[in-house]
Amino acid sequence: MMFRHPWAFFLFILYVPLIVWYVAKWRNSNPSLGVSTVAVFRRYRAKGKVVLMHFCFFLQLAAIGAMIVALARPQKHDSLRSSTIEGTDIVLAMDISGSMTATDLKPNRMEAAKEVATKFVSQRTNDNIGYVVFSGESLSLMPLTTDKAALINAINGTKEGSLRDGTAIGDGIASAINRLVSGQAKSKSIILLTDGTNNAGDVAPATAAQIARQKGIRIYSIGVGTNGSIAITDPYGFSTTTIETKIDEAALQGISNATGGKYFRATDSKSLRKVFEEIDALEKSKINVNNFTQTEENFMPWVLIAFVAFGLMLLIRYTALRRIP
């Protein structure tokens, strides 16, 4: 049994003033009549009528209570659900090197990437998702998890400069693989987001791609930003430097092709959003769900109880407790 509007039970507070009023009224109702003798009244017994008067008040409370329960909309739910869900394990590997603060994407590359990544994560309700960051080295920030709130907080809390600078693409992929091998899903993939060329780390990107292929892991690589001279700002916002950036598209394309994934290029915030939308469509979970749900309203019995109680109260009032004007 469930209630559609449980807040209606607060109306039972009305019982307090009603009971206080009734008790006060009863205590103050002591009529008197002066007569020469009470002998004629001895055969009358008021006790039964007093009980009936109290019973009428009880019927009033019962009618009010039944109407409150009816307002709360009691419902009975019958549900039969058979579902088969094949979840997807995904690790997001994000480049957080200094060049990710370039402003060719607004407000900058990293913030634009974080925005679309959080939206992507929030839409993947049935998947285990992990989070890895890399620059001159890699760091796994979140294991595979279904706790989307914690994952989004980790993504939003990512800052440039928290790791040694550089671009260790191979190490980032290797850290993502280490997270995915413990997953139970049949479908496993890495979303690799970078704006540069591998120039640091211990693992070559091609080697990491071969390991991913052996493990049955697809890599969707995304080249973020434009090539050429880009202005970047230090983490504290005090100085701006112009650097040359060049995305190694051939290497990223090779990584994706080797694992059965796909390479994307995002030169602005709009195209980056479209990339994540396409990946979201490619990596949809397979869900087969058969649901049968029946909701039965059960407020009518309570309405009938209210009417019966109120009707019985009126019947007693106008028969046994009838007053002469």
Image: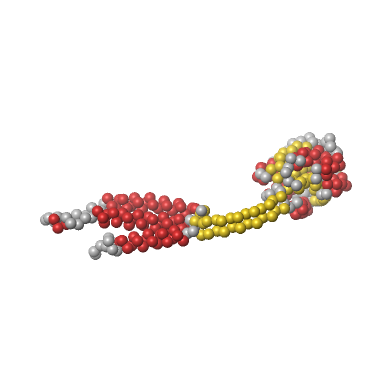
- The image shows residue 304 at horizontal and vertical percentages of 42, 61
Residue drawn at point x = 26 percent, y = 51 percent? 28
The C terminus lies in which quarter of the figure?
bottom left
- The image shows residue 30 at horizontal and vertical percentages of 23, 53
The structure's colour scheme is secondary structure
Viewer-nearest residue: 2 or 82:
82
Viewer-nearest residue: 304 or 273:
304
Q: Number of callouts in the render?
A: 0
Q: In the displayed structure, would residue 179 be above or below residue 17?
A: above
Residue drawn at point x = 67 percent, y = 55 percent? 289
Residue 236 falls in which quadrant of the image?
A: top right
- The image shows residue 161 at horizontal and vertical percentages of 76, 37
Residue 185 at least partly seen: yes
Residue drawn at point x = 38 percent, y = 50 percent? 16
Q: In the displayed structure, would residue 184 be above or below residue 298?
A: above
- The image shows residue 154 at horizontal and vertical percentages of 69, 41
Residue 134 at least partly seen: no
| In the image, farthest residue toward the right | 250
Viewer-nearest residue: 229 or 128:
128
Q: In the displayed structure, would residue 137 be above or below residue 273?
A: above
Q: Is residue 112 left or right of residue 304?
A: right
Q: Is residue 3 left or right of residue 263?
A: left
| In the image, farthest residue toward the left | 36
Residue drawn at point x = 51 percent, y = 53 percent? 1
Residue 60 falls in which quadrant of the image?
A: bottom left
